Amino acid sequence: MTSRTVKDIMVPLSEYVVVSEYETIKGALEALKTSQDKTPPHMFCHRAVLVKSESDEIVGKLGYLDFLDALDPKFEDLDELKTLAGSGITKKDLKKEMQGLGFWNVKLPLIKKIANELTVKQVMVKFEAHIEETSSVIEAMHRMVQLKAQSLLTTEDNHITGIIRLSDLIKEMTDLILMEK
């Protein structure tokens, strides 16, 4: 087996979708879609955007589930429901009542409003974990499993250079395992 490194399979920062922390959810989705539309069929498309601060530092990420979570109207946070919940009615009972009343039949204009008003900074997942690009792919596998991470930022001398994604890592591991001696 060859000793491949994270650098061999990572996506360089220059090739990844990066948006400002002040971009709206809609703008971030547009940037992600543009990137996906340009991805050749034989490659994995990006399923997240990286978020940069005003000083151009990568400070976070928004993945598919993060986008959906941001767009969810979160009716359970309404003050009236909190008051009802405090009166002994369970969350399960509230959910059943809300479904019965068609509460989840949210209109698209509300979701579009959220996408136009909410900024990436308000909902991004802050990056804390990273891995040196000189690390082995086996170490990357171990770190991702331990952290239950979909991706890790890659660094060289504490400078962010890119991202290693779960999809690229599993492809590499599959290729290594199935490789003829």
Image (tube, rainbow, N blue to C red):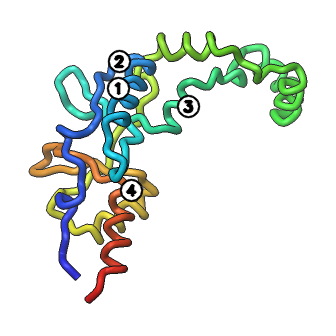
Mark 4 or mark 2: whose residue is earlier in sequence: 2
Q: Which mark is residue 166?
A: 4
Q: Residue 68 — which label?
A: 3
User: Label 2: few (<14), some or many (≥20) within 10 Å?
Assistant: some
Give the amino acid at mark 2. Glu
Residue at x 42% of width, y 51% of height: 150
- Mark sitting earlier along the chain (3/2): 2
Q: Earlier in the sequence, mark 1 or mark 2?
A: 2
In this view of the protein, which residue sits in the foreground, 83 or 130?
130
Residue shown at the point (69%, 14%) measured from the top left: 107
Q: Amino acid at mark 4?
A: Leu
Cβ atoms at labels 4 and 1 below 8 Å apart: no
Q: Nearer the viewer, mark 1 or mark 2?
A: 1
1 and 2 marks in contact (CB < 8 Å)? yes
Relative vertical location of residue 172 with respect to residue 110 in this rendering, above or below? below
Tell which circle, 4 or 1, labels the residue nearer the N-terminal end.
1
Identify the residue under disc 1: 31
**Which residue position is annotated with label 2?**
23
Q: Is residue 174 above or below residue 90?
A: below
For the question of whether residue 49 can be seen, the reply is: no
Say left or right for 3 vs 116.
Answer: left
Q: Specify the label residue 6 is tagged with.
A: none
Q: Nearer the viewer, mark 4 or mark 1?
A: 1
